[in-house]
Image (cartoon, rainbow, N blue to C red):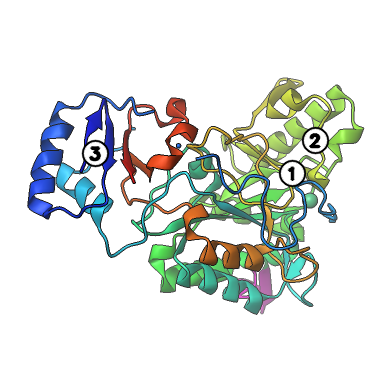
Amino acid sequence: MQRKTGGTFYWGKIPFANTLLYCLCLLLLLAAPSCTAKSLENPLMGLSPENPAEEGTTEVKEEEEEIENPPAEQKEAAAIDEGLPRPNELGEIMILMYHEIGFPEDEWRRTPDNFRRDLQTLYDLGYRAVSLQDMVRGQIEIPAGTSPVVLTFDDGNKGNFNYLETDGEPELDPDCAVAIMEEFYRENPDFGLAATFFIYWPTPFRQPGYLETKLQHLVKQGFEIGNHTNSHANLSRLNPDEIRQELALHINETQKYVPGYRVTSLSLPYGAYSQDPGIVREGSYEGICYQHEAVLLVGANPAPSPYHKKFDPFRLPRIRASEIKTDGVGMYEWLEYFRTNPSRRFISDGDASCITIPLSAEQNLNREIIKERDVRLYE
Ligand SMILES: [Zn+2]
């Protein structure tokens, strides 16, 4: 059965004729004001796959809406399609951390073919790429039954974005991360094209002559440029003025090549936080302002759903996209974990105007972030 309190819809297990359900729901939707729905202790927090490492204990070796509401009919179809995995928009999300793409395969380097295999594996398992910004803002628009995954690259290594020079003409290196993702997107457009490149200065991607071309290309393609400080600084060792300088100068340099571009996320070099966490969120140095919506750590768990009460955009854990020295908490261990524990995984209802979660998880829903969106609960 379903019943309604405010804008919250409860779904029972008993299947109903679609028509009856549709009519009933349409009536309820028409009558419902904006959603005031009120969810499960996040089951993954503090847990990990086999032999988990506590977050933060993984060695940091970095050097290493206005959403247009779809018709009510579509809403119902998305929510009750029994042929798809049950939606759970309070499940956890993997934010993958890559560094170099190149040779040979190493703890902090993925070969081009292994990176292609990562993308194919994610796609085959029902993951779809979403940008970090959309994830943090809770604007996750992927098909019903699929799960978001966020791709990030730290350090702006050459293999992230590289041009080959043959006969003096620059040609995109087909084995660099940007080319691989764009090619995968052409072949699988429903995977999406999204990633954040956390660069530092003076020479991101290590080819001085192509800086403007590369940064503008990234923005044009919908990739994000993220702050990784100006000089890859360990913020835990700097005083407040030095920290502000490191963060603001990055913005200043980036905007020289992409005027007006707004950097909204920070990846902490070495995963090292400043003693005063507030300094990294926003501040200014010599008139250059920075404001980050997301601050990314290094290890080693999936992130909570942006709709979960435990979601903290300023302490987002990431999963190392590697198969070497992963301490049991690398990308493939987590993929296996979610395969065998599908209830822990964020699964979309395909409807960005509505949040669908199990009734048992209702107490964990952060109603402030979902705002006027409807909430559907099922048993
Ligand atoms: Zn780094």
Marker count (numbered): 3
Label 2–label 1 contact, CB within 8 A? no
Q: Earlier in the sequence, mark 2 or mark 1?
A: 1
* Residue underneath mark 3: 69
Location of residue 286 in the rendering, given as x and y in whole percent from the top left corner: 76, 21
Ligand 1 has an atom within 8 Å of the beta carbon of the residue at disc 1: yes
Q: Earlier in the sequence, mark 1 or mark 3?
A: 3
Picture disc at residue 228? 1
Q: Earlier in the sequence, mark 2 or mark 3?
A: 3
Q: Secondary structure at mark 1?
A: loop
Give the Cα distance between marks 2 and 1. Answer: 12 Å
- Residue 274 visible in the snapshot: yes
Picture disc at residue 273? 2
Magenta stretch in the rendered image: 163-176
Instruction: Decide: few, some or many residues near mark 1? Use Cα within 10 Å; few <14, some 14-19, many ≥20.
Output: many
Is residue 168 rendered magenta in the image?
yes
Is residue 64 rendered to the left or right of residue 81? right
